[in-house]
Image (cartoon, rainbow, N blue to C red):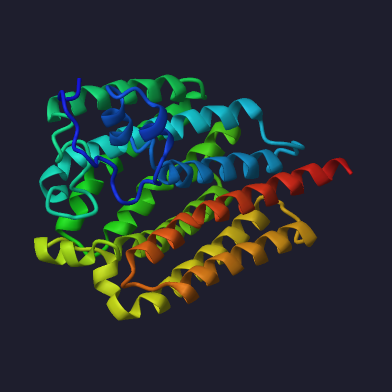
Amino acid sequence: MPTSTEPAHPTVPDAAAGNWVDRWAPPALRPYLRLARFDRPIGAWLLLFPCWWSQALAEHANGRLWPSPSYLLLFLAGAFVMRGAGCTYNDIVDRHYDAGVARTRNRPIPSGQVTVAQAKMFMVALCLAGLAVLLQFNWPTVILGIASLALIAIYPFMKRFTYWPQFVLGLTFKWGALVGWMAVRGKIELPALLLYAGCVLWTIGYDTIYAHQDKEDDLAMGLKSTAIRFGAQTKPWLTGFYAGALVLWTAAFLAAGVRPGLVPVAGLLLTSGLLAWQVATLDMVRPDNCLQRFKANRFVGWIVLATLTAEMALRAV
């Protein structure tokens, strides 16, 4: 259980003011819900969308007219639970660093709302819930899902050793692009690999934007990131990552049998425009600007999913 008192201002800067955790959750649960980032769900959505995209793409290849609602719900539950478990693990590993960063010092562990032992028990509970969801799929999917734990385990340590922790985050966070396909097709095929690779590039791009919020604190503590590595050249790098993601996603769609018609082209143009807006309007010295453009990637997720769903439905016309 949390300690008897909470800090006067426990909300971290990247949580929306008046979010549902702060307004409605029982006080005893709030530190744990914050630990799992349920007050800041953008990360869970960014984890979820590649699962949904891959599921829909695989079902398109199978000739279905709509994504399976039961799989959509399973991936929704699994993404939020496992993102919570991963964030809890990250906060356990990074608790001493988080205490020295303005954006993270009010997180539950460094601020004393939750002890490390309590956080570990909470993480185990979330992992068991995630396993219960995973076991609803076929055994190849279960094995593939469990394999992601190796990446989850090493990711928090990467910023100590490499300027490319965002690459490892991409490999970890977008594993669902493989899992969604495996759940439907029972094997990994070219479209899933292309989709996964594109999602990795997308993650490097948007998490570089996110990392610009912390670069001064990271430099002071000897930590590394692509934001520090790219510096003033961030925008050309972002352009390359986002362009690469769009090319790979297009190739994945074509490889899965998506027709190059009006709906896919419109989806591609909308997605391209949103990614281009992020790069063109990014102000790397303004944390609020970086956070807003990072969060805008949820619209990328919805656009791609809507494009796939609409293309599937058109088969019935």
Residue 160, position as x, y percentages in the image: 14, 56
Whether residue 155 is visible here, answered yes or no, is yes
Number of marks: 0
289 lies above or below 316: below
Taking the spot 19% from the left edge, 32% from the top edge, the residue there is 6
Closer to us: 185 or 71? 71
Which residue lies at the image location 21% right of the left edge and 44% below the top edge? 106
View extreme (front): residue? 8
125 to the left or right of 256? left
Q: In which quadrant will I find the C terminus?
A: top right
- In terms of depth relative to the viewer, which is nearer, 308 or 215? 215
Residue at 13% across, 29% down: 115
Q: Quadrant of the N terminus?
A: top left
In the picture, measured across the screen, residue 314 lies left or right of residue 305, that is right
Q: Position of residue 85 (x, y in %)?
A: 31, 32
Query: Residue 293's image quarter?
Result: bottom left
- Rendering coords of residue 108 (x, y %): 21, 36
Asked if residue 127 is positioned above or below residue 217 in the image, the reply reads above
Q: Is residue 126 left or right of residue 224?
A: right
Tell me which corner region of the image, top left, top right, bottom left or bottom right, holds residue 315: top right
Q: Is residue 201 visible?
A: no
Give above or below for 142 relative to 235.
Answer: above
Measured along the vertical axis of the image, is residue 154 above or below residue 201? above
Residue 241 placement: quadrant: bottom left
